[in-house]
Image (spheres, helix red, strand yellow):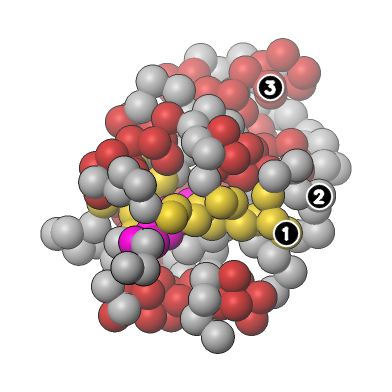
Amino acid sequence: MQERRAVLWDMDGTLVDSEPLHEETLLMSLAAEGITPPPDLHALVVGLPARSIHETFSARYGLAMPFDAWRRFRSHAYLARAARLQPRAGALEVFRELQSLGVPQAVVSNSERLIVDVNLRAIGLMEPDLVSVSRNDVRQGKPEPEGYLRAAWLLGLEGAEITVVEDSPTGALAGIAAGYRTLLWPQAPTTAPAGAVLVAHLGELRRQLSLD
């Protein structure tokens, strides 16, 4: 009997090409405080939850806006621009193909529920039976494994062969910590953490997911 398999997806930067919009709202919040962004902004924030980003900019760059006000500022700016969001090239097609094969899938994100739902709706994945785990649904976000473990539990995947697909080393660490096979499919060159498989392009992703 073939072992049941499943795929757990990260959302921002993996399923949805949303990192540019997240960074745009971050830049807006920094500009509001007169802060010049560092040259390594993307590498500094990719994959991190909002609170960690706020703590980093408060400690290193003097961001004075309280966390709740900063979060509202960015959320309002994000929602006002969310209609422009698109799927990452090829990702939605892979998701649909796995879906047609009956492979269980879920979305696990470090973003808050509001952003998760807006993103999924923007790319046509807001479906009644889709399991999604947001930062609001767990006590500890990525790189801790709780989100992926919760998604597997919600899908009833005990004993299944589970693959995690991520675009950031932070997220990949969460998949590895959960004990799952982890594919790192970054949008920019990066180094995969030990235990993750670095996927250079869409064709390789398809091969790793046994679609080619």
Mark 2–mark 1 contact, CB under 8 Å?
yes
Residue tagged 2:
191
Rounded to the nearest angstrom, the CA distance separating label 2 from label 1 is 8 Å
Rounded to the nearest angstrom, the CA distance separating label 3 from label 2 is 22 Å
Compare residues 87 and 103 and report the one nearer the observer: 103
Q: Residue at x 31, y 43 (%)?
A: 158
Q: Secondary structure beneath disc 1?
A: strand
Compare residues 24 and 200 and report the one nearer the observer: 200
Residue tagged 3:
56
Identified by mark 1, the residue type is Leu
Q: What is the quadrant of residue 125 in the picture? A: bottom left
Q: Is residue 187 left or right of residue 210?
A: right
Q: Residue at x 82, y 36 (%)?
A: 38
x%, y% of residue 211?
50, 81
- Can residue 206 be seen at all in this image of the molecule? yes
> Of the residues under marks 1 and 3, which one precedes in the sequence?
3
Identified by mark 3, the residue type is Thr
User: Closer to us: mark 3 or mark 2?
Assistant: 2
